[in-house]
Image (cartoon, rainbow, N blue to C red):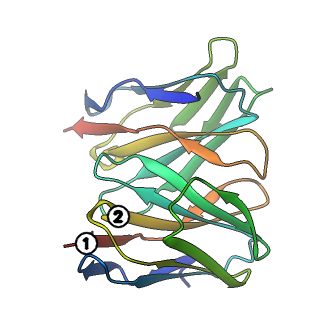
Amino acid sequence: SQKIEQNSEALNIQEGKTATLTCNYTNYSPAYLQWYRQDPGRGPVFLLLIRENEKEKRKERLKVTFDTTLKQSLFHITASQPADSATYLCALVKTSYDKVIFGPGTSLSVIP
Amino acid sequence: DTAVSQTPKYLVTQMGNDKSIKCEQNLGHDTMYWYKQDSKKFLKIMFSYNNKELIINETVPNRFSPKSPDKAHLNLHINSLELGDSAVYFCASRSKWDTQYFGPGTRLTVL
């Protein structure tokens, strides 16, 4: 069955460093992959989408890579700030009308 | 100018009761979803509607019945509530660029 794993449940990092979160999947061939941010008591908020034919996407301090051979996506936050502390979810989709499968999330804490 | 709204935000009820959660989106999207996020924070899809038509039903007990009166609304009715139904329920809509917009969630507690 399809499985998505995110590198760890929790990740602590010093302010100013680059946070790297990992999303691995098995038994799935997504057309694209998304990253969302979720703050406590709130719904997930979309951050970035990367398609299977794209290697890398950037948005301000965020960068996503997608390796369909390794079945892995890396999500980087450069110059991390305490305000970046949240849970980050990766999500896989096969087609536009297919269900979205979410990973378990990684809770990121950026320490001042 | 909230994009996706849900009511109520909190719902506390007794086992065996029937309850409804309402969702509305003002983004003009054709596709809407219901997700359940359990205590372990896993977000699982329950239902998906496209233009009022059910397109995904993820092995959810038939005590859960979604209803879409129009493409801006997707409500969730739950019969005979059980303890295991306690969770946060999120409504979402999907843009044509495949990004999802989530509502603030409804925290359901079944006593």
- A71 lies left or right of B108: right
Q: Which amino acid does label 1 sit on?
A: Val
Q: Can residue B92 be seen in this view?
A: yes
How many labels, in total? 2
In terms of depth relative to the viewer, which is nearer, A65 or B110? Answer: B110
Where is residue B41 shown, x and y percent of the image? 34, 48
Q: Between A109 and B65, which is closer to the camera in this rendering?
A: B65
Label 1 residue SS: strand
Residue A71 is drawn in which quadrant? top right
> Which quadrant would the C terminus of chain A be assigned to in this image?
top left
**Picture layout, residue A18 above or below residue A36:** above
Q: Nearer the viewer, residue A21 or B55?
A: B55
Q: How crowded is mark 2: few (under 14 residues within 10 Å), some or many (20 or more)?
A: some
Q: Which of B79 and A82 is in front in this view?
A: B79
Quarter of the figure with the N terminus of chain A: top right
Instruction: Tell me the kind of residue under disc 2.
Output: Asp
Q: Residues within 10 Å of mark 1 (few under 14, many from 20)?
A: some
Q: Quadrant of residue B106?
A: bottom left
Residue B79 coordinates in the image, percent (x, y): 43, 78
Q: Mark 2 points at which residue?
A: B85
Q: Residue at x 59, y 63 (%)?
A: B101
Find residue B110 and name its label. Answer: 1
Q: Do the residues labelled 2 and 1 touch (CB within 8 Å)?
A: yes
Q: Residue at x 30, y 32 (%)?
A: A9
User: How far separated are the C-alphas under marks 2 and 1?
Assistant: 7 Å
Residue plotted at (30% across, 58% down): A40
Callout 2: SS: helix
Q: Mark 1 lies on which chain?
A: B
